[in-house]
Image (cartoon, grey):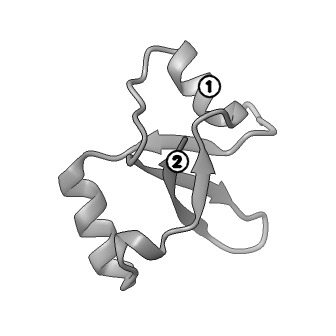
Amino acid sequence: MTKSLMPEHVVLSDYQAKRALKQIGVPYEKLPLIAYSDAAIQFLIRNGQSVSVGDVIRITRESLTAETYYYYRRVVS
């Protein structure tokens, strides 16, 4: 098992984003923000992912004592 200091970041499709936000009960406008210049976003771009301002990013964090947690961020310039 390989450990990374950066949690997994995934760009969601429009359908996936709408479904996830409905499930957690948070409107798109209220999502926390992540800058397009953020190192994690730049890593995705360097690895061939298409990331645009307005996209929703799912961040997956594994807990040593609990379960998997998902965090969502909206990409801004």
Asked whether the viewer can see residue 1, the reply is: no
Q: Residue at x 58, y 67 (%)?
A: 69
| C-beta proximity under 8 Å, tags 1 and 2 | no
Q: Residue at x 22, y 51 (%)?
A: 14
Asked whether the viewer can see residue 63, the reply is: yes
Query: In this figure, which residue is indicated by the disc labeled 2?
Result: 76
Which mark is on residue 42?
Answer: 1
Mark 2: amino acid = Val
Q: Quadrant of the N terminus?
A: top right
Towards the viewer: 55 or 16: 55
Image spot of residue 27 (x, y percent): 35, 78
Q: Quadrant of the C terminus?
A: top right
Image spot of residue 66 (x, y percent): 69, 74
Image spot of residue 12 (x, y percent): 34, 47
CA–CA distance in space, label 1 to label 2: 13 Å
Q: Residue at x 46, y 41 (%)?
A: 10
Determine whether, in the image, residue 41 is placed left or right of residue 48.
right
